[in-house]
Image: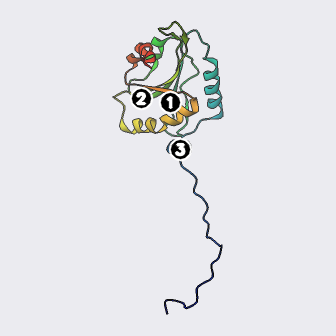
């Protein structure tokens, strides 16, 4: 018989399922990136010191970062802090991408001094697709770890010489 002649008693027991955590796309992607790429404690300290130390700088300051292909660690290329845009452009490789953290003091049209802290995403057109993907997938992690608000993409080292105009655009 499909139906019971007597009604079934109503109960206040509900099956509850654990709530699924709300996923935010940037949080989710950053979580997957952070499992793949790493920053040493020393690199994280350097990132923080650079960000805090450049906010009142009188001259441009930049540091070049790379990804180690074997360990997938994001680290500074060397301990050099560039204060000259030309020497920075000269030291960028012709066939490999890099992240460049840049603090560039400039005077706005209003006369106010501004020191934007940006990340240059240097991606030369001559680098291979595997390396492009490696850097592209870690870009947001680097941005969030370095605590920069803006990424400026450049594909030639010579573009750095015109960085002041790009910084004033926004």
The mark found on residue 78 in the picture is none
- State if disc 2 and disc 1 touch (CB < 8 Å): yes
Location of residue 169 (image quadrant): top left
Residue 95: percent from left, percent from top:
38, 27
SS of the residue under disc 3: helix
Up/down of 7 relative to 166, above or below: below
Residue found 57% across the figure and 18% down from its top: 80
Which residue carries the number 1 mark? 66
Which residue carries the number 2 mark? 96
SS of the residue under disc 1: strand
| Distance CA(mark 2)–CA(mark 3) | 20 Å
Circle nearer the N terminus (2, 3)? 3
Can residue 158 be seen here? The reply is yes
| Distance CA(mark 3)–CA(mark 1) | 15 Å
Tell me the crowding category of disc 1: few under 14, some 14 to 19, or many 20 or more residues within 10 angstroms, Cα based.
some
SS of the residue under disc 2: loop
The label nearer to you, 2 versus 3, is 3
149 or 48, nearer to the observer: 149
Residue found 63% across the figure and 26% down from its top: 48
Which residue carries the number 3 mark? 36
The extreme top residue here reads: 111
């Amino acid at each position: 018989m499909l139906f019971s002649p007597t009604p079934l008693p109503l109960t206040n027991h509900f099956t509850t399922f654990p709530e699924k955590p709300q996923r935010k796309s940037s949080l989710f992607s950053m979580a997957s990136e952070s499992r793949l790429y790493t920053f040493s404690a020393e690199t994280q300290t350097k990132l923080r010191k650079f960000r805090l130390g450049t906010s009142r700088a009188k001259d441009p300051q930049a540091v070049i970062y790379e990804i180690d292909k074997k360990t997938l660690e994001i680290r500074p290329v060397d301990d050099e802090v560039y204060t000259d845009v030309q020497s920075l452009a000269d030291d960028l490789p012709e066939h490999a991408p890099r992240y460049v953290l840049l603090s560039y003091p400039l005077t706005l049209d209003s006369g106010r001094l501004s020191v934007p802290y940006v990340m240059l995403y240097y991606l030369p057109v001559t680098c291979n697709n595997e390396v492009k993907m490696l850097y592209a997938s870690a870009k947001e992690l680097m941005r969030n770890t370095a605590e920069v608000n803006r990424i400026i993409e450049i594909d030639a080292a010579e573009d750095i010489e015109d960085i002041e105009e790009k910084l004033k655009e926004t």
